[in-house]
Image (cartoon, rainbow, N blue to C red):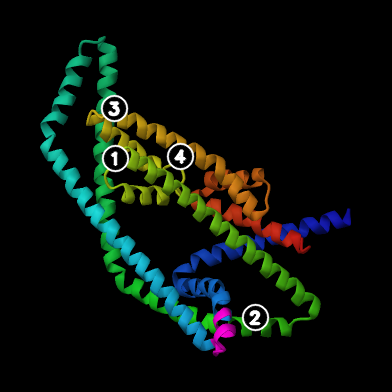
Amino acid sequence: MNSLLEKLDRTIVFIVAYTLIFILFFSTLGYTLPFVLGILFAILLQKPVKFLTRKFKIKSWISSLIVTIIFFAIIITLLSLGITSLTSESIELGKNIQSYINKNSNKIMGFFNNLQTNYHHLDPSIASTIEKNLSSFTSKSLNLTMAFTKKALSLFLIFLAKIPYTIMVILFTLLSTYFFTKDLSAAKNKIFDLLPKSKSDRLYSIILESKKMLSNYIASYLFIIFITFLETLIGFLIFKVKYAVLLSVLCGIFDLLPVLGIGAIYIPLAIIYFLSKNYIGAVGILILYAIVSVIRQVIEPKIVSSSLGLHPVAVLAAIFIGLKANGIGGMFFCIFLVVFYNILKKVEVL
């Protein structure tokens, strides 16, 4: 009985401590982002640095500098190419949408006039209900379009305003990555030397398990996003959808969002195809949407649970409860709660 109470007390202390750390971490992330990224990149670059140091018999600070410069050169190049491609496609898409509306304004108005003429032949009560719903739908659509346009414009202006901050974050991240990469091994050894043997071994086990599970978690979600992107790209190329790359990238990003998800891309696209009288394309896109969604729902628990060494039901429960409680933030909170609990249980802390 005492052991059970002791275990329960430790679990409660863990949940409280984890919650406080989680809130503190994300509430201060705006100030600590370059250093958090620096530590993560430094951990990622440890093996290449050690390889260069051993292979070419050079000092660790030189190998750290070389690896950091190469790493950031690759990241900045890929981001530049991606942003350039997405920007050009986005501009072209915006121009084409405006051109399509201007050229087909008569057809769009004719469609609504025909609809209005046809439903007036129905029973008055049914016609009244349809008219109210249609009016409500049109009003909501216009409001949503206006809100989306304003939001997009405000986000663009915020982005322009934050360019100096972004440059500063990149610069500080680069510098912190170099210094962390250079000093990480020495700092880690000093910390372990200060602790008693039993505690240093336990701390090393916790760090090792945390590193393994967190890297597996990130890799598993990157893999899920890549699968969604690839499925969407192949499907859009088959149906000859314009801006397939841009829309596929957006689907990969939207795939992380709760409720909205990839439907924010697929459903409007299917509606556009339907209004263009490309019924086969519209049905094909809806079928593709269903296939991608089902595959995503099936593979997510399996990939995440296998990479973290957790039971699929535990992962499903964490995702569902987290999304229901507080969206994406709640999902991350619940999943990391399960992950860290599992880590501490493995090293016999809990």
Q: Where is residue 226 in the image (x, y as percent from the top left)?
A: 46, 52
- Alpha carbons under labels 2 and 4: distance apart: 44 Å
Is residue 208 part of the magenta span, yes or no?
Answer: no
CA gap between label 1 and label 2 equals 54 Å
- Give how far across and how far down residue 347 sits, in percent: 76, 64
Locate residue 322 relative to residue 101 in the image: left or right: right
Asked if marks 3 and 1 touch (Cβ < 8 Å), the reply is no
Vertical relation: 36 (above or below) 314: below
Q: Is residue 82 above or below residue 57?
A: above
Residue 188, numbered label = 2
Q: In this view, does 117 lie to the left or right of 218?
A: left
- Label 1: how many Cα within 10 Å (few below 14, some 14–19, many 20+): few
Secondary structure of the magenta portion, mostly? helix
Disc 1 secondary structure class? loop
Q: Which residue bears the numbered disc 1?
A: 240
The residues tagged by marks 3 and 2 sit, at their Cα atoms, a distance apart of: 62 Å
Instruction: Residue under label 3, please give it.
Output: 279
Observer-side mark, 3 or 2, equals 3
Report the amino acid beneath label 1.
Lys
Which mark, by number, is residue 292? 4
Most foreground residue, 20 or 342: 342
For the question of whether residue 251 can be seen, the reply is: yes
Above or below 139: residue 28: below
Q: Are marks 1 and 2 in contact (CB under 8 Å)?
A: no
Which callout, 2 or 4, points at the residue further toward the start of the chain?
A: 2
Q: Within 10 angstroms of label 4, few (less than 14), some, or many (20 or more) residues?
A: some
Task: Using the image, determine if residue 12 lies above or below residue 71.
Answer: above
